[in-house]
Amino acid sequence: MNRSMFAAAVSVLLLGGAAVTAQDKPMEKTAEKTVTTTTGTTTSKAHTVVGTVKEYEAGKSIKVLVGKKTRSFALDSKSVTTTVDPAVAVGSKVKIVESKNADGVKTLTVNPAS
């Protein structure tokens, strides 16, 4: 009995460790979510980028290296609500999420990748 519990615990730790490592890898993906209710259908979109900060000018712009590509994001757009974690710096790994909800409100969030 103890042996099977030990094996299960080790499996969980290994799988959890693999999931954490996978989040640190550079990646880029887009997701769209459609919800239908009695009042109608709403669609929201989210674009996620994980990479290393190549250039960062607080309140103005950020450039992130994703694999072999560099992605640029404006942080000073009046039409986008932007939130940047204070720990973000050149050389750090970050996760950037650009989203647009059903009402057309755009947000950009920059956080350290974990």
Image: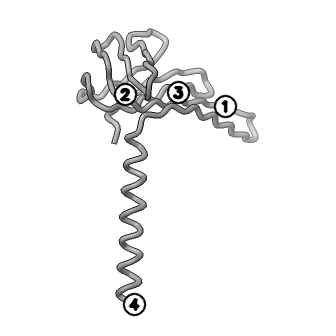
Q: Please tell me the numbered disc located at residue 43.
A: 1
> Disc 4 and disc 1: Cα gap in Å?
49 Å
The crowd level at tag 2 (other Cα within 10 Å; few <14, some 14-19, many 20+) is many
Q: Quadrant of residue 25?
A: top left
Q: Please tell me the numbered disc located at residue 1.
A: 4
- The mark that comes first in sequence, 3 or 4, is 4
- Residue annotated with mark 3: 99
The crowd level at tag 1 (other Cα within 10 Å; few <14, some 14-19, many 20+) is some
Instruction: Identify the residue shown where x is 25% and y is 22%.
Output: 90
Q: Amino acid at mark 2?
A: Val
Q: Amino acid at mark 4?
A: Met
Asked whether disc 3 touches disc 1, contact meaning CB atoms under 8 Å apart, the reply is no
Asked whether disc 2 touches disc 3, contact meaning CB atoms under 8 Å apart, the reply is no
- The mark that comes first in sequence, 4 or 1, is 4
In the picture as drawn, the residue positioned furthest to the bottom comes out as: 1
The crowd level at tag 3 (other Cα within 10 Å; few <14, some 14-19, many 20+) is many
Asked whether disc 3 touches disc 4, contact meaning CB atoms under 8 Å apart, the reply is no
> Disc 3 and disc 4: Cα gap in Å?
48 Å
Instruction: Identify the residue shown where x is 55% and y is 30%.
Output: 46
Q: Please tell me the numbered disc located at residue 110.
A: 2
- Asked which secondary structure carries label 3, the reply is strand
> Disc 2 and disc 3: Cα gap in Å?
12 Å
Nearest the eye: 44 or 112: 112
- Asked which secondary structure carries label 2, the reply is strand
Of marks 4 and 2, the one in the foreground: 4
Instruction: Identify the residue shown where x is 39% and y is 90%.
Output: 1
Nearest the eye: 62 or 106: 62
